[in-house]
Amino acid sequence: MRVHTLSLSAFGPFADRVEVDLDDVGRDGLFLLWGPTGAGKTTLLDAVVYALYGTVPGARGEEKRLRSDHAAEQVRTEVECEVTLGGERLLVTRRPEQQRPKRRGTGWTTEQAKLTVQRWTAAGWEPVSTRIDEGSEHLRSRLGLSAEQFCQVVLLPQGDFARFLRAEPEDRGRLLRTLFDVGRFARVEEWLADQRSVARGQWDEARLRASTLLARVAQVADVDVPEELAPELVGAAPHASAGAWVQRVRAEVASRRADQEVEAERAAAEVERVDAVLAAARAEVDRHTRRDRARAELGRLQAEEAELVPLRAALDAGGRAEPVRDVLEAAGRAALDAEGAAAHLESVRHRWTEVAAGRPADTVLARALRDEVAALRALLPDVDRAAALAREVGEATRRVETLQTRCAQDEATAQEWPTRLAEQEARVGEAAEAASSLPGLTAVLEGRRTALAAARAAGSLAGRREQQRSDVDAAREAWLDARETWGDLRTRRLDGMAAELAAGLADGQDCPVCGALEHPRLAQHDGTVVTQADEDAARAAAEESEARLTVLRTALEETDRELAVLRAQAGPEPLADKEAALAEAAHQEARARTAAGALDGARRALTALAAQRDAALAAAATAREELARLTAERAAAQETLAALQQRLRAAQGEDQGIAPRITRLTTEAERCEALVEAEGAELRARTAAEAARRLAEERVADAGFPDLLAAADALLDRATAASAGRRVAEHDQRWSVVTATLAEPELADLAPRPDLDALTDSCRGATRTREAAVGSLAEVRRCADALESLTADLTEIEVELDERRAHAEQVTALADLVNGRGSNTLRMRLQSFVLAARLEQVAAVASRRLRDMSGGRYTFLHSDAQGRHGARGGLGLDVLDEYTGARRPTKTLSGGESFMASLALALGLADVVSAESGGVRIDTLFVDEGFGTLDPQSLDAVMTVLDELRRGGRTVGVISHVEELRTRISSRLEVIASREGSRLAS
């Protein structure tokens, strides 16, 4: 993993965009990221972590405040990092969720987080992913490190390893768990703990089932469970069996069962004897009851015999009349049919009379009427054709009239076209003339606008020129006064120069004028003393006044030139005339522009008008042709219609039309045919009725009846005859059954009726005694069977209980062992044991660098001793002092020694974590630790180790604010803090 470039905007203390080329700054393999405390050095490292993982390390990431408070609203918070991962060069751009101003209206809106990953190819940057989840997974697979591991391996964090060095074993274990994956060992601990709970639960469940079985045995046998087999003691110790107690209970139940079986057999024999006596008594009572019922039934039958004599006579007559029922019914139906045929004939004859007109009804007349109807039906299509022709003639007449009106309108419109075209051509000419004059009018308008603006500007500038002239005059007066003051002071100083020189003389000192060593009479000032400083101040004031005068004169000259130019542009006309001329020119130009703007529309209108004229003339010609065609078609249709109507009038005769005539003739033909058919039907019905009557009279006489009416009266309804026959048959059958019953031998000479109630009570008592004995026996048998089943279940559960106890004890011992309890004398958990092995590797790797930095004095030693107050151990860390040969706690190291030990530990941990993560190659490393606690010699040793780190192309960045490092590391990147935010020194 190598970081090439880093760019960040509005991130942390950096308000604007900051770009860092790590390939350039780290070209020597070692560079210094220097700056005062709080400038934002660590923020650059946070930006690298955020670009790769979407989070920042430590407590800074908990607040989720990535955006710079110094940044402007329009600047978006963004981090861009170019990095090589697994041989693939990637460009990672990430933005957090942030607030930005709305593009429309006021207020703020939330901009969602964004991640873009691009890959460098021969063709340039090509996209890999624009989705956060997909891009993060791509980076994670290439990095091979979690965010916590990355922060500990690549960004050796400020202060973390000093705390790790002095931490208690439990605290040290928490950090190691974030770096090394011991989750599977933690899951083993949890699994064994769960298995322990499961095994104990199964053991307790088996004990509960055994206790339940013992309680069930006691309940079934109606005894108490012994104290040694109480529920809390069952299965608590091996070789504790309840079999002997259960066998004693089963022996007692077997003895009770034998006694109950003897008692049940005796009660069953007594019930069998009483049942036999009761059955014989019941049979005797049944015979008495049968004889009494038969005698009563015979008396009732003798009383009913007199009532059945008339019924028997009617059944005999009905039996003789039944064979002639069919001929009687046939004669009746034939007579009814003859009467109906005669009535129908009279009705049909009346209907024919209404339309006969004196004509007799026969088949010849009916056929003639049908033929005439057929001929008229053949003319029905001509009727439809005549109606259609009439509609066509009417429609043609309406269309001819419409076309005649339209042709007249077209002739009137055609006379207006030349005038309309001429008017439109005139409009086009006016618009074209306005368009040609528009550029000239526009130029005149712009010229007058320029002149008016120049005149107005000249008026305003003239007032300013007067003010400038007054300022120049005042400045000239001030300059003259300053020069005069300066000249006066200079003259006065020259006059007092002797006194000024005398003030600097002393006895024995050469005079600068005459060289004398004695000065008997020194010159004295006779007025105010003027010094060199007074003269210099006056001269400076004069020069300043002269400079101000020069500036004002230059400004006045510039104003005069500008005023001359404006007056030349404005011209001599007064301002009011210029404004009036501008208004007139604007009016003319606007009118011309409006007219010119209508040129294209006028031309299009002219073209459209010409097209309309051509279309109207073509439509008029087409309408005239259509009028001539329709007039000819209408005349032909009228001629055909007249001929067809004449033929139809001849065929309909006196009727209103062909259809009414067809209806009338069809009605006459149907009535004629109906009368002929009715006459034949009436004759056939009358003949059949006569034949049926003669046959019926012959059959009735053969059956012994005097006439047809007597035979008909003797006929019985089938239901009545069946009911009467059943009544007589039932009476005869009951008579036979009763006489046969009374004749039975067992009903003769019966003994007296026995006392059945007494015998029944005796049987019931014996039965209750037997049921009680059988119930007791069944209860004892159920108890014995239940005990047998419970004995088998109890034997099985005792075997299972021994197995569950052994398994629970084994799993508990193993779970206690991996959780640092029981036989585990070191009190080390399984994952702590694994972490202790990793810590041993870290101590071995870190010791090599610590010996280099400490001059061979210190070596890390891993300790598996328990912590304070018996706390869990295995993650202790000590140092071996070669000077004394003593093993010392890391807390006894001095500040500088602690720094070297922390740095060596961080580097060793980085190497082990890198190897643990599949040998991830780390080509860029940052050391964020304080170097201020080191003396020069220790600092040299640390720098030697850092130089070794850059071997093989690795780049090491040191983050510090120590001033001495600026002289030791030539390649530097300086962070400068200010009130407007941090920035990088150029």
Image (cartoon, grey):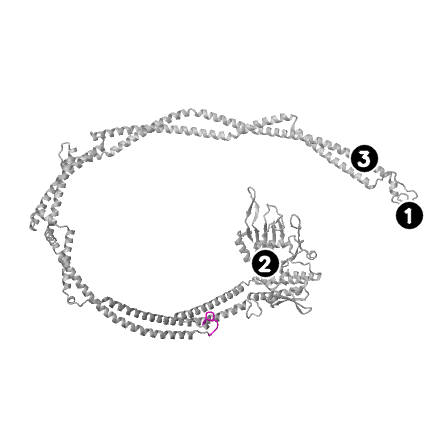
Q: Is residue 79 left or right of residue 301?
A: right
Element under label 3?
helix
Circle 1 is placed at which residue position? 508
Pinpoint residue 715: horizontal percent, then vertical percent: 12, 50
**Residue identified by numbered label 2:** 150
On screen, residue 836 above or below 239:
above
Mark 2 near mark 1, Cβ–Cβ under 8 Å? no
What is the magenta range?
229-239
Chief secondary structure of the magenta portion: loop
In the figure, 542 relative to 135: above or below?
Answer: above
* Alpha-carbon span between mark 2 and mark 1: 85 Å
List x then y, in percent, for residue 270.
27, 72
Total marks placed:
3
Residue 565 x/y as whole percent: 67, 31
Residue 613 quadrant: top left
What's the mark number on residue 480?
none
Mark 1 is on which residue type?
A: Gly
Q: Identify residue type, mark 3.
A: Glu
Q: Which mark is residue 484?
A: 3
Q: Is residue 835 found inside the magenta-colored segment of the image?
A: no
